[in-house]
Amino acid sequence: MPFYMKTNDTSPALEAVLKDGNGAVVSLIGASVSFHMRAIGVSDAKVSSSATISDAANGVVYYQWQPSDTSEVGSYEGEFEVTYTGGEKETFPNNRHIEIEFTEDLG
């Protein structure tokens, strides 16, 4: 199910519970997380920034939008990338991308 927002909005944040391939919640204790987003069909990222861990034990993260992130109408795909304490990286969701749609605001 896509995440919908109007252009130029910065709320609500994009929140996710990160789960492994078996559907188990991933512990983020000691980890760091970034968020990446690009327009569908484009290779360059529009967003590549730090995300916030709000509940490390239960794998809950969010990305707080910046005005430039939501400035253009379009279809985008996003993902959260975790870097664990040992330097290993894992990307979520691991079986698809997060679908994100920005529609034009009237104001």
Image (tube, rainbow, N blue to C red):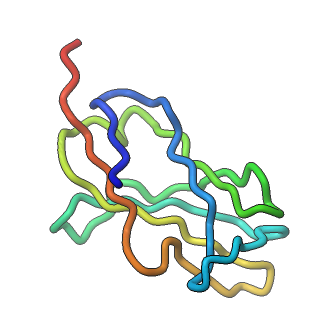
**Nearer to the camera, 4 or 43:** 4
Which residue is depicted at the point 38% across and 27% down?
Answer: 9
Label total for image: 0
**Nearer to the camera, 39 or 12:** 12
In this rendering, is residue 94 above or below 34? Answer: below
In this rendering, is residue 52 above or below 67? Answer: below
Report the side of 2 relative to 39 (left or right).
right
In this rendering, is residue 58 above or below 21? Answer: above
**Residue 23 appears in which quarter of the rendering?**
bottom right
Report the side of 16 relative to 41 (left or right).
right
**Residue 44 appears in which quarter of the rendering?**
bottom left
**Residue 5 appears in which quarter of the rendering?**
top left
Q: Which quarter of the rendering shows the C terminus?
A: top left
Pick out the residue farthest to the top. 107
Which residue is depicted at the point 48% across and 29% down?
Answer: 11
- Image coordinates for residue 65, horizontal then vertical, percent: 47, 39
In this rendering, is residue 98 above or below 89? Answer: above
Q: Which quarter of the rendering shows the N terminus?
A: bottom left
- Image coordinates for residue 45, horizontal then vertical, percent: 33, 62
Which residue is depicted at the point 33% across and 51% down?
Answer: 2
- Image coordinates for residue 20, horizontal then vertical, percent: 61, 80
Which residue is depicted at the point 39% across and 32% down?
Answer: 67
